[in-house]
């Protein structure tokens, strides 16, 4: 079978989308897997990309799959409990969340750069439940477009492995608009501290790309200062989970807060905002 060429993906941050894809695929092949994503395996086999540089990335594999499981659980609960739910996946890359969840309910909007979405649409064709938006998340016209299409819907906005690659000012502008136009609903994203940012050049997968972490979030409640209708509900840390799967060095680092708290997942509630 002819494999799809990925040379059209030239953006440094966009190129990192192949990392979680490969980690999901590798995890799926384990008997003690954290997640199960057969579609990721199929996509890996369908693209012409050198995944071998990530073969030794134990920490990324465990971390990515902990995050996927956590985000999937939040999305599933949201879909089950809302009347007309909308899920927005920012910087979606080649994520296959709707397939993993398997619920025939709600609408997923997948947002990413045009060069990413052109590849994604070939591998994960859009349909009435999975709608592609070929725009940068910083082209904030997508925010009002979604609200206009779904004026009464509850919206869950998810950003997985995305925000830390940009500056605080860039992310702030996005979160302010999300909180203003897509509330009420929920917001979930992962982040790292300033210390975590400094570690990106030694990160077991990111070091093989031209992307680096830029935004360090030391104060978990900082987004509440940017939008008064954002309310932090939960913060969870990767290294608190699946401890038996981390390598020996990671298990040692898990006892040192500057390391163990460097990477985290944050869940916010968005109450109604006055537009």
Image: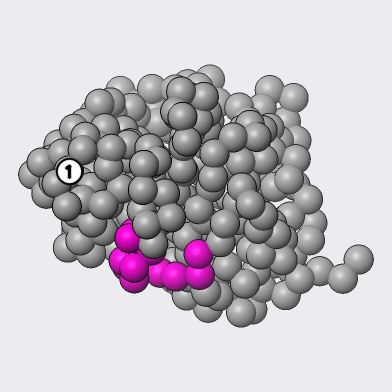
SS category of the residue bearing label 1? loop
Residue at numbered disc 1:
273
Q: Nearer the viewer, residue 116 or 244?
A: 116
Left or right side of 26 for 113:
left
Residue 210, compared with residue 246, is above or below; it is below
Asked if residue 206 shows in the view, the reply is no
Residue 19, compared with residue 47, is above or below; it is above
**Residue name at image x 54 percent, y 45 percent:** 107
**Residue name at image x 50 percent, y 70 percent:** 134
Residue 198, compared with residue 13, is above or below; it is above
Span highlighted in magenta in the image: 133-144
Left or right side of 224 for 112:
right
Q: Position of residue 172 (x, y in %)?
A: 19, 57
Which residue is farthest right? Answer: 1
Q: Position of residue 223 (x, y in %)?
A: 16, 44
Residue 171, compared with residue 97, is above or below; it is below
Q: Check residue 86 for magenta coloring.
A: no
Q: Nearer the viewer, residue 86 or 73?
A: 86
**Residue name at image x 33 percent, y 36 percent:** 186
Q: Nearer the viewer, residue 142 or 261?
A: 142
Q: Position of residue 13 (x, y in %)?
A: 44, 66
């Amino acid at each position: 079978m002819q494999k799809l060429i990925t040379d059209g993906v030239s953006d440094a941050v966009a190129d990192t989308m192949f990392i979680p894809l490969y980690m999901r695929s590798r995890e799926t092949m384990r008997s003690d897997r954290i997640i199960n994503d057969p579609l990721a395996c199929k996509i890996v086999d369908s693209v012409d990309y050198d995944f071998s540089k990530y073969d030794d990335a134990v920490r990324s594999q465990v971390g990515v799959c902990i995050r996927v499981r956590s985000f999937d659980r939040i999305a599933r609960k949201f879909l089950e409990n809302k009347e007309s739910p909308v899920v927005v996946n920012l910087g979606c890359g080649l994520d296959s969340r709707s397939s993993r969840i398997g619920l025939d309910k709600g609408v997923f909007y997948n947002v990413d750069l045009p060069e990413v979405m052109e590849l994604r649409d070939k591998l994960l064709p859009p349909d009435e439940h999975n709608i592609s938006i070929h725009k940068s998340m910083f082209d904030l016209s997508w925010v009002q477009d979604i609200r206009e299409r779904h004026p009464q819907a509850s919206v869950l906005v998810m950003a997985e492995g995305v925000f830390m690659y940009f500056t605080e000012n860039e992310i702030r502008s996005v979160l302010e608009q999300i909180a203003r136009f897509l509330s009420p609903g929920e917001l979930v994203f992962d982040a790292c501290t300033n210390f975590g940012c400094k570690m990106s050049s030694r990160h077991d997968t990111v070091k093989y790309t031209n992307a680096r972490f830029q935004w360090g979030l030391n104060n978990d409640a900082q987004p509440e200062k940017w939008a008064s209708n954002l309310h932090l509900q939960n913060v969870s840390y990767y290294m608190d989970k699946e401890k038996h799967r981390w390598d020996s060095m990671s298990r040692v680092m898990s006892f040192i807060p500057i390391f163990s708290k460097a990477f985290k997942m944050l869940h916010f509630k968005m109450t109604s905002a006055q537009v």
